Amino acid sequence: MYLSVEGGYRTIAENFDIPSHNTVKKWVKPYEMLGESSLVRKKLFKTYSDQFKLDVFHYKLRTGESYQKCSS
């Protein structure tokens, strides 16, 4: 809507019940620079299976490596 000039940050925030117009502003700027992919939420943390964690733990015990070396 903003890019189509159908309203400013405040108007769009009000129309969609977004608490702050700054949120809309934070979405528009990356979109203008990087496109739609900039709005996709990225997974921050990798998850590991219980078996993988046990394998790393046993590797650490066998080799004496530090946890940091085992996890890299």
Image (cartoon, rainbow, N blue to C red):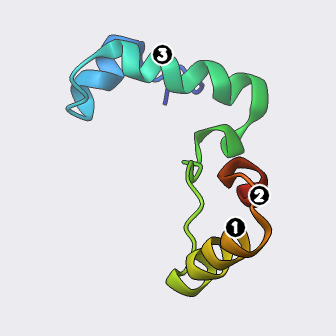
In the drawing, does residue 19 fall left or right of residue 40?
left
Which label number is shown at residue 25? 3
Count of labels in the image: 3
Q: Quadrant of the C terminus?
A: bottom right
Q: What amino acid does circle 3 point to?
A: Lys
Q: Is residue 20 above or below residue 45?
A: above
Q: Which residue is mark 1?
A: 60
In this view, the mark in front (2 or 3) = 2
- Given contact means CB atoms under 8 Å apart, are the residues at marks 1 and 2 in contact? yes
Q: Which residue is mark 2?
A: 65
Residue at horizontal 66 percent and vertical 54 percent from the top: 67
Give whichever of 8, 36 is nearer the camera.
36
Residue at horizontal 62 percent and vertical 18 percent from the top: 29
Estimate the spatial distance between the alpha carbons at disc 1 and disc 2, rounded to whole Å: 5 Å
Q: Earlier in the sequence, mark 3 or mark 1?
A: 3
In the drawing, does residue 38 fall left or right of residue 44?
right
Q: Is residue 50 above or below residue 20?
A: below
Mark 1: few/some/many CA within 10 Å (<14, 14-19, 20+)? some
